[in-house]
Amino acid sequence: MPKKERTFAAKLAHEARTLHKHECPVCGKEKVPVVFYAAVYGESGYWKPQRRRLKICDCNRKEIYG
């Protein structure tokens, strides 16, 4: 029998349980893992979503969210 795929929510919950807490060396606050979706335009002019996992703190929040 094939192995059952985990849902996106289950993957995030697993990541939250298993990852260690990272502190920012600049501001000293905890970095929060988030999933960031961005529109990437290809050579043909169409766009496709790009999913990236980022760790955000007060230092880089403005760079990420604008």
Image (tube, helix red, strand yellow):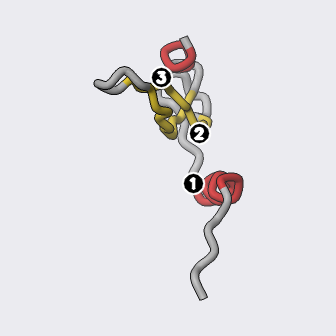
Q: Which mark is residue 26?
A: 3
Q: Residue at left 48%, top 23%?
A: 26
| Image location of residue 4, percent across then percent down | 63, 74
Q: Residue at left 63%, top 57%?
A: 11
Examine the image and state in which quarter residue 1 appears: bottom right
Q: Residue beneath label 1, please?
A: 19
Is residue 2 positioned above or below 44 on the image? below
Q: Residues within 10 Å of mark 2 (few under 14, many from 20)?
A: some
Is residue 20 positioned above or below 33 on the image? below
Say whether marks 2 and 1 touch (CB < 8 Å). Answer: yes
Q: Residue beneath label 2, please?
A: 33
Is residue 37 positioned above or below 10 on the image? above
Mark positioned earlier in the residue sequence (2 or 1)? 1
Q: Amino acid at mark 2?
A: Pro
| Image location of residue 58, percent across then percent down | 59, 20
Depth check: give the residue in front, 43 or 28: 43
- Label 2: which secondary element: strand
CA distance for labels 2 and 1:
10 Å
Depth check: give the residue in front, 46 or 1: 46
Number of dots carrying numbers: 3
Q: In the visual, does 41 lie left or right of 33?
A: left
